[in-house]
Image: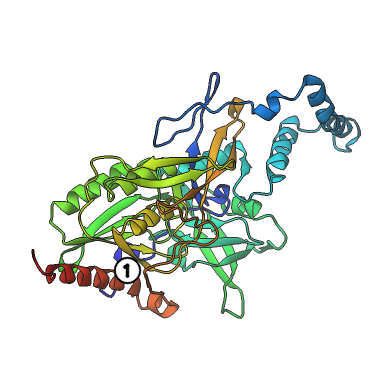
Amino acid sequence: MNKYVRGGLIGAVALVMLLGSFSGGFLVGHFVPFQAGGIQPISASTPEPVPTVSPQQQSTTPDELETLFQPFWEAWGIVHEDYVDQPVDDLTLMQGAIRGMIDALGDEHSSYMDPKTFEDANAGLTGEYEGIGAWVDTTADYLTIISPIPGSPAEEVGLESGDKIIGIDGDDMTGIDAELVRQRVLGPAGSTVVLTVAREGEPEALEFTITREKIVVKSASGEMLEDGIGYVQITTFGDKTTSELRATLEELLAQNPKGLVIDLRNNGGGYLQTSVEVASEFISEGVILYEQYGDGERTPYQALKNGQATEIPLVVLINEGTASASEIVAGAIQDYGRGKLVGITSYGKGSVQNWVPLSNDQGAVRVTIAKWLTPKERAIHGEGLKPDVEVEITDEDRQADLDPQLDKAVEVLLEELNGSSNAPQN
């Protein structure tokens, strides 16, 4: 095989410019809607209501709270009375106060999402949005491309993983918050943006003129390769992923493949619940992951029943863009020996966030509530998953439209199939 399947290294969701709001482009978490009497996380098991007031808050008296917040209201009054440009925007001040509170946690994956950012984040997981089509990282000094989406404007002009956006439409982005840079790249389909990019190994900056488009990404798809091998590509873990994966598997398995290659490269993650559902298509029973909270308590997430591909041989493709929810699936498959991992070490995003919408459509707070562990209780946060077979892709491979990682995955799968067929029979 001397070409990328459906474009090869697959970016997951796009750059609405997508997801600076995922603080690094990666997410695994629960969506937590407000309900009367508390909030309710969406999870694989029947969840317990999450209280809106912590025990620590319950032990704080009204007088203590009044004293605690007195400096805040003093600052509020000073701004309203003394700031030179009046009147001030109370809504902006309120949103800034929330953002500052969450930033004070010092956790790169906890953040306040204003209404527009929250809308963009949710749009990304539905698979439709307008933009240039790439995963981005907003935690670095410059807005950084994680991976372009196949067929997207970003891929067509030649943006690559690791590209740093140092200029937009001729304006220098040095010292500008990466989230603000992300917003500068946003724009309606049909409009153009000129990105100046610093790329490792290039002595001078590169310039790309990109026409934004409406991006529609199918989160799971597949096809039959040579030698009777089925190929399944999962690009994100969103609202439609489970149903699209099941339809893909049903179509492929009807063709009696000998084995499957599951491509999770550059899959930046998504909903935790979806990762459990996806893993359950390949693992018949047992724990898919553990959520471990700050107090040491753990919540296991068990495999669901009736997976379609729980017996067929597997190989899973991973790379540096395989993150979060996709690492949950790859880690479970590796721990249970369901299949080997081929590629390079994954990103290493092993924390869980709750998304809690705020009242009056004022965006949402995304807060880290736990870290997750693989079935063998491996913590991969900051470490990533190490492949069983390490294979890199070079710039020369990309320019020649080669995919040695996929080639190796098929080779490993065929070797295992031939080995099992040659095994002695009882």
Furthest-left residue in view? Answer: 426
Position of the C terminus by quadrant: bottom left
Secondary structure under the numbered disc 1 in the rendered image: loop
Q: In the rendering, at what x and y percent does residue 265 appear?
A: 40, 61
Q: Quadrant of residue 389?
A: bottom left
Please state if 219 lies on the left or on the right of 35 as rendered: left
Give whichever of 275, 127 is nearer the camera.
Answer: 275
Position of the N terminus by quadrant: bottom left
Q: In the rendering, at what x and y percent does residue 155 appear?
A: 44, 64
Give whichever of 109, 375 is nearer the camera.
Answer: 375
- Other residues around mark 1 within 10 Å, as few (<14) / some (14–19) / many (≥20): some
Q: Which residue is mark 1?
A: 4
Q: Does 100 sit above or below residue 326?
A: above
Residue at horizontal 89 percent and vertical 33 percent from the top: 78
Q: Does 305 sit above or below residue 52?
A: below
Please state if 246 lies on the left or on the right of 349 as rendered: left
